[in-house]
Amino acid sequence: MILENNRMLRAETAPGTESSFAARARQVLRQNDMGDWTRAAPNLYPHQWSWDSAFIAIGLAHLGPRRAARELLALFEHQWRTGKVPHIVFNPEAPQDSYFPGPDHWACAAASPDAPPAPPYTSCLCQPPVHAIAALRVWEVAERSGGEEAQEARAFLRQLYPKLLLWHRYLMTHRDPEETGLVTIYHPWESGTDNSPRWDAPLSNVEVGDLPPYPRYDLRHVANVSERPTGADYDRYLWLVKLIKKAGCNEKDIYHSHPFLVKDVLLSAILVAANETLLEIAALIGAERGDHTLIASWIARGHRGLNAMWDPELGLSLDYDLRTRRSLRARTVAGFAALIAGRQGRRRLEALMVTLDSPAFLGHPWLRWSLPPSTSPFDEGFHRRSYWRGPTWPVVNWLLWWSFLRAGELRRAESLRQGSLQQIASSGFGEYFDPFVGESLGAADQSWTAAVTLDWLANEPRQGGRKVA
Ligand code: DGY
């Protein structure tokens, strides 16, 4: 079967041909295209999600850097005055019963003095800051084609740069008043890894009060309800939203009173990597010297924070609950945060690779593809079909692939690229995949899955060097 899939992948990605695989990925992005922005998925996610859009821009760059740039600019039009980039910008044309909690639920966020003009309404949460990484990628693709596209992409970087700087400043200040270098999240949705066992302990301390009945439209769009978070999870999610709204989305009030305040190592590591790319953007557009110094200080602080979260026994980084002052001992892909932050010494990098190769992750004998499950099968919270409790996620694999390339671990990067493409080629552009049988789960035609596929296809290693997209 594996041989057959390898053959299929080779045929699909033969050099010099527009493979049907790439054509299908482009088709998914086109079908979800709303003009200036892209739906995360056609039914389950009919709005613009923040980190989805960043990955989508990476894929769109291969359809045309101009459209990719618009994706990011459209998102940043709804940036809050504080610098926050909202985790959802709601599509006013989406049917009311398509997604919950939708724009009505969040409309009160628009009353905050920091909110952008509405409609469209936005949520007042945020998501991992992949945007600077995406913006640089768009420029890299445009630069390769040269001429007008490259010039336009440089203008795009100039336009986006101050917004990116403000976004990162928001995370480094409002979300890290203690100056630890680690970002605090107020809600599991901010981590992007909603029902991961990472959040089981802090969520168990959240006492849910009176909640009116609410619909679970998401359950209509999956083959089996076990693929989505449970009712108990959702009660807590909605209760936390209620408290955030009660605090008027005011950062200081939330920090003071909120029952869920966690230092998220994955988000913090993505911010370190995003600050590295922001430094590159600053150099490309000739930003002020002071900006370079500031961003470099954020990177150093981020590394210090992450170093403190390293658990030598598990060989992973651990999140930290500010309320109970305890590390959260879940074994999940977020534990590879140090790899994503980059610039690790040889010993730390080797320790991470030992953990990755161990039976807790890639060495597990039942894996369909050699790709890391979102939660280790050894973790008591593991569930192979439930969202972030076990399934493999192409965007996480993209981040690990990109990080291995940056670390010079080309063989490992290539193995992740191949495995990911094989999984998607054989099961489709699903949202996530059962790690043991490879079945596609969650939403079908997920935009970011198509997007990272296009980026992987454009980055086949060449003999004597890597083709840079
Ligand atoms: C969802 O609805 O599943 C999202 O992850 C929340 O943003």
Image (cartoon, grey):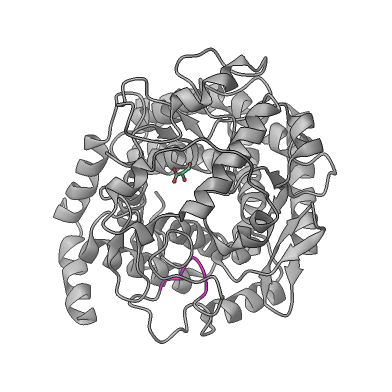
For the point 68% across and 70% down, the residue is 329
Indicate yes or no whether the magenta region holds residue 468: no
In this view, 150 is above or below 56 = above
In this view, 324 is above or below 6 = above
Please state the horizontal and vertical placement of residue 321, each as a whole percent of the image: 75, 56
Can residue 127 be seen at all in this image of the molecule?
no
For the point 70% across and 37% down, the residue is 171
Specify the farthest residue to the right: 178
Please state the horizontal and vertical placement of residue 151, each as a whole percent of the image: 43, 25
Q: How many marks can you see?
A: 0
Q: Which residues are magenta?
A: 371-376
Indicate left or right for 22 with 210 as reference: left
Q: Nearer the viewer, residue 34 or 253?
A: 253
Q: Quadrant of residue 79?
A: top right
In this view, 88 is above or below 272 = above
Please state the horizontal and vertical placement of residue 67, each as a whole percent of the image: 34, 29
Q: Quadrant of residue 237?
A: top right
For the point 79% across and 30% down, the residue is 252
Quadrant where the N terminus is found in the figure: bottom left
Indicate left or right for 122 with 53 as reference: right
Can residue 395 be seen at all in this image of the molecule?
yes
In this view, 117 is above or below 26 = above
Main secondary-structure element of the magenta-colored stretch: loop
Indicate left or right for 283 with 434 as reference: right
For the point 74% across and 72% down, the residue is 311
